[in-house]
Image (cartoon, grey):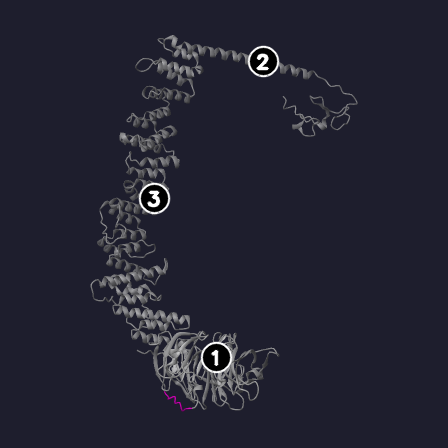
Amino acid sequence: MQRRVFELDQTRQAACGSVVTALACSTVECSGEQQVSSSSSSTRTQEGAQSRQGQLLVGLDDGRIEEYRDPDQGGGYGGLRLYRTTRCGNKQKPVDQVCVVSQGESKMACALSGGSLWILPGDADSGGEHDASQVKLSALKGCFRLSADNTNRGCRSLLCACRFSLAPGLPKRLKLVVLELGETLGSDQGIRSRKRHGSARVTHEQAVETQPGGGSCDLGPPSAVREVAWFGDSVLLRTDARFAQFSLSTELGREVFATTTPASALASGGGDPGWESREGGEGRQGLVPLPGGQSCLLVAGDLGMTVSGEGEPTGSVVQFPAEPEAVHASCDPYLLAVFAKSVYVYDSRKGPRDSHSQTLNLPIFLSPNKPGRVVVESMMGSGGSSSSVLVVVAHGTDLFFLARTGLEDQCREALRQGRHEECLAIAETSSREEERVELEQNSRAEAGIALLHQGRTREALGYLRGCAGFGEEQILPLFPKYCARWLHRVRRRRFWSMSPPLGELVVEEGEGAEEGAKRLVAEFLRDRRAERGEGESEGESRDGVDTLLCHLWLDCGEAKALEALCGEAGNEVCVEAVEGRMREAGRIHALALLRENTGNLLGACELWCGLADGKRTEVELREGSFLSGLAGGEEERQRKLVGEVARAVAAAGKGSACALSCLPWLMRRDPQAALGLLREAGYGAGEAVELLGELGPDHPERWRYLDFAVAERGSVDPAHHTDLALALAALWGSLPEIDRGSAKGAEVRARLLEFLEGSDYYNTGAALKCLSRHPSLSLETVAVCRKRGDHAESLRILTFVLKDNERAVAYCEDLGTQEGYLLLLDMLLNPPEGPALYAEAVRLLSSTGASLNPLRVLEALSDAMPMPLAYETLARMLRERQHRKRAQQVLKGLARANEVSVAHRRVARLSEHVEMTEDRACRVCNVRIGTKVFGLYPNGVLVCYRCMMRRGEDAKHVCPVTGRDFQEEI
């Protein structure tokens, strides 16, 4: 099925007064002062305005060049109006070629006529008839062909092919001249044309060897060269018999291929070099540069082969139905071949077999008997879009136009015929980014909507995925059962309005087809939600889209995807719309996640607690959901549910209803996790202890938080200290006998003893009452009794219960008074039951008796104690007392003697006198003292009062001569 890529523009068909021999098209910048005129009327654009206008240059066989432009108003050739006429000389020779060279926004037009190069007037000369400026350069003599550099369309250089002779009568040779056109040039490098229209200079001149040898191929005489195409350093040549390539830098040429009969040699790459052109063959087009400037189409007979700029074949071949009159390739990506009755349009992106896209019948017959050749050019209208391209075809005096069908119209036509991929390919051909994006978006949307109506869900969503303009809310009408409350808010995007509004989802027949279609829609919505990002709103129905996606995952039984949706931050699923279905489907965990995301943490925890307690049931549908495929069985299941509750309680924060309601449950299920929350959430010790009421007094984890509150939080509440003591004692009592020697039992007892010894805030009475139920906690009872000041009970337990006399003696040493030792001695001599422990009493006296009062010891000794046992101890005590008395007497005598010595020295010093004479002088300043006040140091140094006080009152005891400090010697 053919596409309508071009169509004949009936409004632009015309007949010229003379035979058209050359065409050139371009665009020009026009200001408000420029005028577009014709023979009968003229128009002026708005003053000061700037616009881009299409420029059509028509070369005629009488040497005239007519320039047409397309202003806003119609006229002339159906919208093109005559701007001006330019004459190339007065000899009325035909215009062989017209070229437009450019550099940025500046353009310059030139023409080839009568073997001379002519530069057309600039835009400053408008209206009427003007004369072109001839470029008179000796290097351009015999010029017969022009070519712009196809690899650099922005340069102002031309390649001129010339035929010249070294002397009259000698054979002509082929010469290539590179000419630079510009506004100003040096006087010695070029020539300025008349009327200051432009200038030209030769930048490169090179003769081409056309005979074999010397690195060149056999091109035949220069008269056989018909066309040239310039690609930077490479030049492609067409002669009557072959195509060749020539390098400007190396000056080497080679044959690309030779042509024989018009239908065979191109495919085989060889042929008979003796093939001769038919009459009029010079007018045939053989070199067609392709857009991009890197390749060229070589046309020979009914075949065309693409080669690179260096002449290397690229493998692309076009088969024409006959030998074309002309080939045009500037309407990328389309190739136009003009025949006698029609124009064939080929798509260069496709292969040779299916590249033919359209056949367009011509309104006239291009008879070979008609004078002149077929000339084809294309021009871009002022709009700049692909739909404003005009292809101008001229033959004889006939001039008609082919208008490029608008890309939107082509896309619409392809959509109507169901060729969706071709529609996207058409959209991509637009050269403007904005137009290409709009066409692609609308094409995808229309294709997707049409396929949804046909029930081809997978293909439809494939197109809609790449359409950013098709919002997720446009899917809601497919499911009116789920989305009834949101349908009135959905604003339908019409795009091109080629399909009716979407209704209920159409599903192809087949088992599982409906579920498969819903799954595809759900995956589409999921992917689009991921693309839009968190926090980005899509229309006004995001909650409807999220709710629909939840329903679809429920229909498909995708528990994992449903849980991912419900647990996603920022989802807007309407809870009341899906809660009933989720309960019926057994998706309790997903419902809990949904409640959590909506801020209902207490409701979420209630569902998780119900699952853990067996009050609710989670149906396991597929592997990968929250409670499916757990390796640990029920234990792992409980652990995961408790973890979810703990996470929600932590998120709820201190003092929330969720925390107050669920922490007791969490205490029973996972005390360690609950206590961790109490620590991290910053609960006060009082609040935490209230929550700990859920745990029994002997719970193994209860004491840990109390210990945390007392040791780390620094609580001084007596109730907390008492609770910790009782909890540790109760925990120890609850341990089996075999576990009391384990690491856990050792940890509990060590912490209990450390706490009882270090804390001053617990109730000692309550602690003693609790400890009395556990006889094995004797050391702990000793610590409490010591806190109460009941040292007698402590020593009794140490001596008679634990039978640890060394610990008892250490206890007395810690007290630091004689009372403890005497109390312990009395217990040893008068035990509550059994005989007196004389040996232990003697050891006690032997170790510490020396520091005891002997009288108190004698009073404590029993009358029944054998004296031999106490003799040594008592004798040592007496000797020690006697030694202490004598030592004190000696110290007293020494102190008295020292006092007497000091008093004697003082008297001696006070009895000393100083004799002053008139000759005595100060040892510091050497001034006679006379009647002045003076000072005398103990070392005999005499100084005046001024020198003595020079360093201040605090330093007057330092000798100013020797530096001796007498105060330190006292």
Picture coordinates of residue 581 (x, y %)?
23, 56
Disc 3 from disc 2: Cα separation:
78 Å
Picture coordinates of residue 531 (x, y %)?
35, 61
Q: Which amino acid does label 3 sit on?
A: Gly
Q: Give the range drawn in magenta.
A: 363-370
The quarter of the image holding the C terminus is: top right
**Between marks 1 and 2 in the image, the one whose residue lies nearer the viewer:** 1
Q: Is residue 702 above or below residue 162?
A: above
Callout 2 crowding tier (Cα within 10 Å): few <14, some 14–19, many ≥20: few
Mark 1 and mark 2 residues within 8 Å of each other at the beta carbon: no
> Is residue 76 something one can see in this rendering?
no
Residue 217: numbered disc: 1
Q: In this view, does 231 lie to the left or right of 591?
A: right
Label 1: which secondary element: loop
Residue labelled with disc 2: 896
Disc 1 from disc 3: Cα separation:
98 Å
Residue closest to the far right: 918
Q: In this view, does 618 lie above or below 946?
A: below
Label 3: which secondary element: loop
Q: Residue at x 65, y 23 (%)?
A: 966
Q: Earlier in the sequence, mark 3 or mark 2?
A: 3
In front of the other: 389 or 951: 389
Q: What residue type is labelled 2?
A: Arg
> Is residue 205 something one can see in this rendering?
yes
Residue labelled with disc 3: 655
